[in-house]
Each structure stands twice: as structure tokens, then as C-alpha cells.
Image (cartoon, rainbow, N blue to C red):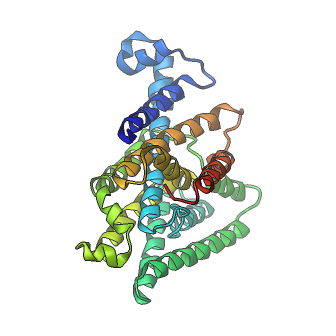
Amino acid sequence: MRTARAWPLFLFPLGAVLLYLLLGRYPLGLREVMGALFLPGGVDPLSRGVVLAVRLPRALAAALVGADLALAGAIFQGIFRNPLVDSRILGVSSGAAFGAAVAILLGVPWHYIDGISFAFGILALGLVVAIARRFGNSLLVLVISGILVGSLFSALIGVVKYLADPMDVLPEITYWLLGSLAGAGWEDVWKLLPVSIVAGGLLLLLRWKVNLLSLDEREAASLGVDVKKWRTGMVLAGTMLVASAVSQAGTIGWIGLITPHAARSVVGPDHTRVLPASLALGSGFMVIIDALSRSLMESQIPLGILTGIVGVPAFLFLFMRYLARGGGWR
């Protein structure tokens, strides 16, 4: 029954992308969109350019960002055995955001900013892992290390914003930190795709191990699982997904927190189903959010604002449902 209910979830991203291609200031009908996708000679060059060069790459970039954040959030919630954990728990989002803020402050060309952001996200993870290993490498130490490193980079972002020119650079940094996919093209898709395929594919292939890692450490070890090795590997893969997404789209909250809860409400607690369902929901949800971002107003609304507006009521609904069921995490 759960499996039958899960199938529509995987059609959700496809429907969201199709809707994305239809929406915009330049009106396009379903026939024009389908013609641009499958019969390039059957539509006028302007419509074909709007679909293939502008809307499609941005829709795919949004889908990849949403899938990365949702999958990472589901992994972290399972591994840390905490339904309130999301992709920001290890300080990677703050590290990647700091890297981008420094790059903008120094006037680095835009096509290098995502690489610098990704490098600082990985640096943040390296600091967290180094601290955790120094003080025992337990789950609690890892989480506390992530919170501390994230707070440090958040403070450093404040320093960068203080030093930035308030008339020019500061608004640019602030807008980037709020999240945006404005101007995303095929080059951004190709940057996101390798990490999504390698790290995301690895996590999906090994998703059955998350069920074991979500058990008590001693219980998991008694079943022959090398808890530290598998947890470290999955945390690294999830972190790469987060760093890749943040480097392309800025800091976007709530996706990694809400979508795993929504997935569990449909497919149950088994992570072999939760992970792919979270990926599908996060992907489609991010595409719809970005469609709203560029369609609701003349100027594009930052993604972080929209995800917060939608995410808070959604989380409240899920939390109230959680309480109504007697506090059982489904």
C-alpha cells in the first residue's frame, strides 16, 4: 500500500518542470513547449530559445538543488536519529556562504564564485571532522562541532558584510545569501550534475544501511555494521550535496527539513523508500518555488524568503500531526 502511494511522488518533479516551462512573462502554450522539446523545427526560434536556453536549464538546476538538499536532509535525520536535523547541522551551508561572500567582497568573477563557495563548504566539513576526531568522534561531538563551526562562519559572514561597501557590494552579498537561481544556465546544470550523480547515487544505492545506522550504535555494531566508517562516508556524501547546492543557489532553508517529513508521511519510516521519495519531493518543490520566485513579481523574490514562507506553515502542520499521533516519529 505504501509503495503504491509512493509512485505519484516520482511524477511530481516531471509535472513541476513542465509547469515551469509554461509559466513566465513570455506566454507559451503546451504545444509550443512540446514542440521546442521534441520538434525543434516545429516552433518559432524565439519560443525555442526561451524553452531550451532559458527556462529548461534553470528548471533542471532548481530540480538538482532541491533534490540535493532534500536527500542530504533525509540522510542526516536518519544518521543522527533526530527529525529536527537538516543540511545546516554540520556548518557546511555557513562555510559555503562565507566563501561566496568573501569572493563577492574581493570582486571575483561570477563564474568562479560557485567553486570558491564549494571549497569553503568542504573546508567547514574538514574542520568539523578534525574537531570530532580530536575529542572522540562520537555522534554528539560531531553535531556540537558542526554547530560551533557553523556559528564561526556565520560570525565571519557578519564581518564580511560589515566591511562591504553598503552602496554596491553589501546588497549583492545579501541577495546571494537569501538564495537565487537567477541567470542559471546549462553550465550550472553541468556543475551540479556530477556531484548529484556520484554522491546522490551512492547514498541511494546504500540507503538500506541508513536503517541500520539509525539504530543505537551498539545494536548496529552487533549486526556487523562498522558504524563509524559508514556514518562518516554518508556524512561526507551528504555534505558534498549540500555544498554543491549552496554554491550554486545560495543558502536555502527548510527544503532539507520539511521534505523528509513529508516523504515519511507518505511512504513510512523505511529509509529505502524515504530517501528516493524525499529526493522526488525536494526536486519538485524547489522547481515550483523557483517558478513562483520569477513569476509573482517583476523583480525575482529570493528563494530563501519563499521557502521560509512555505516551510514554516508546512512544518507546523507536520509537527501538529506528529503530536496528534502521540509523538511517534513516522
Decide which of 205, 251 is in the foreground and name it.
Answer: 205
Q: Quadrant of residue 239?
A: bottom left
Residue lying at the far right of the rendered structure: 167
Decide which of 314, 128 is in the foreground and name it.
Answer: 314
Residue lying at the far left of the rendered structure: 224
Whether residue 118 is visible, yes or no, is yes
Whether residue 111 is visible, yes or no, is no
Q: Is residue 269 left or right of residue 166?
A: left
Up-down relation of residue 232 to residue 210 (above or below): below
Which residue lies at the image location 48% right of the left edge and 25% below the top edge? 51
Q: Position of residue 319 (x, y in %)?
A: 62, 54
Q: Quadrant of residue 301?
A: top right
Decide which of 256, 173 is in the foreground and name it.
Answer: 256
Q: Position of residue 66 (x, y in %)?
A: 49, 47
Residue lying at the far bottom of the rendered structure: 135
Q: Quadrant of residue 2?
A: top left
Which residue lies at the image location 26% right of the left edge and 72% below the top edge? 225
Up-down relation of residue 223 to residue 29 (above or below): below
Q: Is residue 134 left or right of residue 151?
A: left
Counting labels gives: 0
Up-down relation of residue 56 to residue 155 (above or below): above
Q: Quadrant of the N terminus?
A: top left
Q: Position of residue 219 (x, y in %)?
A: 32, 75
Residue lying at the far top of the rendered structure: 42
Which residue lies at the image location 57% right of the left edge and 72% below the top edge? 150
Decide which of 328, 298 is in the foreground and name it.
Answer: 328
Which residue lies at the image location 39% right of the left edge and 21% below the top edge? 37
